[in-house]
Image (cartoon, rainbow, N blue to C red):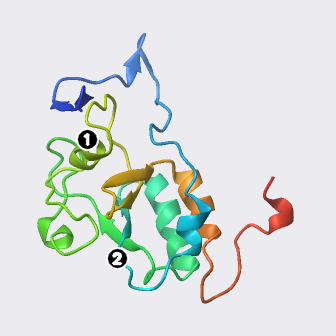
Amino acid sequence: MGMLVDGRWEDDADNIIKDGAFKRDLSTFDRDIPAKILEGLTPGNGRYAIIASKSCPWSHRVMLVRAVKGLASYIDLKIAGGPRVEGYAVDQNDYADDTLAQPVDHLHQLYTSSNPNYTGRVTIPVFWDGANGEILSNDSAKIMRGLDRVPNPLDYTLVPDHLRG
């Protein structure tokens, strides 16, 4: 499967099987999306993107919240896919224009942009800040909660305030 070790992609490295059992690591960029970012979103700002995969159920959840909340014009969606060489590949035609603000061929390049010495698996979905060149979060639940707090034209939340706890 491969993973990053000290910021370098290693095809043969894999830390997902430990003592003969599947062990999913916690999300590395396990952060809430800051409220100041969410409150300042405007349509067409091109700064933030969700990078997801059509084959990942965690990505599906995030893509659904983005769609249901009417945030397509606020937050770009980039689909990782293509040949699974060095993890998730990215399509240069989809990325050359805007949000990523740097040429990339593989998702792991965004991980090392955020942390040059990153060691671990390269997972999606990712909430990306193109202006600062960093992953804000790769935890699907925290990304969904963040998206639910974005003021939007539909003016509703998926989880009412009194149920958030």
* Residue wearing tag 1: 112
Residue 24 appears at what percent x and percent y? 46, 30
Q: Residue furthest bottom?
A: 153
Q: Residue furthest right?
A: 162
* Residue wearing tag 2: 46
As shown in the figure, which amino acid type bears the numbered disc 2?
Answer: Gly
| Residue 148 left/right relative to 102 | right
Q: Does 23 appear above or below 19?
A: below
Question: Looking at the image, which residue is at 54% across and 75% down?
Answer: 40
Q: Residue furthest top?
A: 19
Question: Looking at the image, which residue is at 13% across and 66% down?
Answer: 92
Tell me which corner region of the image, top left, top right, bottom left or bottom right, holds residue 132: bottom left
Gap between marks 2 and 1 measured at Cα:
21 Å
Q: Does 69 appear above or below 9?
A: below
The front one of 92 and 114 is 114
Residue 79 appears at what percent x and percent y? 29, 64
